[in-house]
Every structure is written in structure tokens, then in C-alpha cells.
Image: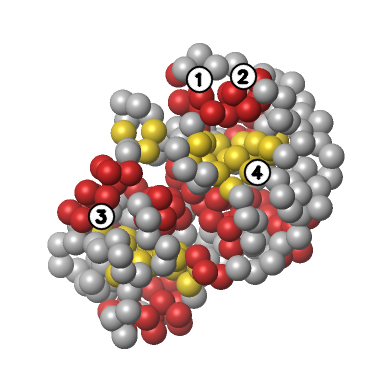
Amino acid sequence: MSERLVSCDWLKSQIEGGRQPHDLVILDVSWSSTKDCHSEYTREHIPGSVYFNVFDLAIHTDLHPRNIPTLDVFQKAARDAGINNMSHVVIYSNSDFCSFFISGRVWWTFKIWGHPKVSILNGGLQKWKSLGYPTTADTTDVQVGNFEAKWTPSLYRTFDEFNEALSGQKIQVCDSRGTEKYAEHGHIPGAHNIPLSSLMDEDSKEMKSVEEVKKLFAGAGVDLTQPIVTHCNSGMSSCSLAFAALLCGNSDVAVFHGGFTEWNIKASDRIDKSS
């Protein structure tokens, strides 16, 4: 496992080893548009974890229906969750695609706001429970942290930045939407389709191995030695695709936050309807 992706075995050993609450902060970032994930958290969560809903922190718009929080708002929420500048933040969720649908987005949000050490728990709560590891309903005591957020845009692209790089053929575009949406709704010209679902091993409830993920990128015609910008509809699954590219060794990766939603509003005449 790399520092970016940690296993349930590793996390269990850290909890049992008593590192908490000193330098390890575990966040349950579960979110859904159809159910109350906070109530689920209060009934059952990984011991020592704190609930953190990143979408309650942002003001959402038509261009960015899944917007990012402002610096001040995010910094306060992170501090209230007990996060310090040097904390090791481990993110997990109980969401689709082996937990990566939400976990990847929250990982990305922490990175663009400058936190140096953030990991995703491979498989999230589903994997944790499948191993028979303990959960609890106990409240976690939190000491307010000192995290100082700073805008760190290496993983973030605006529409103008994305469009300029695309026009100059300086990037490879990777579309993490499902194959049907990519084909039926159209796609950004030249985009390579790598659905988030294809990265997941449903049997193990984890992300596929790095070697398997590398083959998926290669099979889609993507050169992992060249710059990549990922997108989806509104900056959700695309974050986990960017995460996967980084795991594969590509250091020049970013997310087009507005994704196909913003592209469809601003450049609807430049949508490729071919499959």
C-alpha cells in the first residue's frame, strides 16, 4: 500500500496500537442524496472516526452542483474535526464503487486546500465490516486542531484552464462517467472513457491493483507518462480517477471541476456524439 491508499489491516493495527488521537484522524465522509448518512454514522462507524460532510460546507450552483467549500469554511470544519497541519487524515465512506465515489472527492478537497498527508481506506466501511473488524456507536472526543488551509491548485482546473490546455493538445482527457453516459449523452472531444466502476474489484471490495489499473489506462489509449485531466459530470468520480492515475505514478494529474455539466453549458456546440 502507498501512503495515499491504506488497507483495513493497516488501519486496524494503528487503532489498536494507540496512535489516536495524537497524529491519526479518521473521517467517515459518507454522503448520499437519498439517505441520511449521519444517522447511519451515529449507529455504526469505525472506532475513533469523526463524521465529516464536505457537501454541507459548500454553496452549490448550476455550473458546480457539487461545489467546493471556501477556504475559511473548510479550514474551520477541518479544525473542528480535530485535524492539525501534520495530522495523517484517513478517509473512508460507506458509498458506491467500493467507497471511492465519495472518498475520492473528499481526498481531492483536502489536497486542493493544502493538506499534506491524506489517505483513502481501500474498500471503506464495507471492506472493514467484511473482515469482521469492530464498529461502534460511541461518540468520538475531538480536540480542535490547528490546520491552516491554503489554496493548492495543482489538482484543480477551471473551465478556462481546461479549455486552453485541450485546445493546445497539451493534456489527455479521461472521462470517468459510465460508458452509457459517455456514448449516449456525448463527451468532450478526444476524451478517453475509463468508468470509475472499471477500477473496482467487486469480489475483494477494493480498488484493483496498480498493475491492473495501469492496464485499464493503457487499454483506453492513455499514456501515464503524459499530463492527464479527469472529469465526470460535476467533480465526483473524476477525483478517484485522478487518485488512481497518481497511484500509477503519474505526477501531472488534475480534475476539471465543472466537468461535463459546465462543458455542456459553455461549449454545447463542442460535444462529440460518436461512441
Answer whether residue 195 is visible to the viewer in this image.
yes
In the picture of the structure, the residue carrying the numbered disc 1 is 129
Closer to the chain start, of discs 4 and 1, is 4
Residue lying at the far left in this picture: please name it: 275
Q: CA distance from mark 4 to mark 1?
A: 22 Å
Q: Position of residue 229 (x, y in %)?
A: 38, 67
Callout in the foreground (4, 2)? 4
Q: CA distance from mark 1 to mark 3?
A: 30 Å
User: For the point 33% across and 44% down, which residue is it?
Assistant: 210
Question: Is the image coloured rainbow, by chain, by secondary structure, or in one colour?
Answer: secondary structure
Closer to the chain start, of discs 1 and 3, is 1
For badge 3, the amino acid type reads: Phe
Callout in the foreground (4, 1)? 4
**Mark 1: secondary structure:** helix
Q: CA distance from mark 4 to mark 2?
A: 21 Å
Q: CA distance from mark 4 to mark 3?
A: 29 Å
User: For the point 71% across and 30% down, which residue is it?
Assistant: 19
In the picture of the structure, the residue carrying the numbered disc 4 is 88
In the picture of the structure, the residue carrying the numbered disc 2 is 135
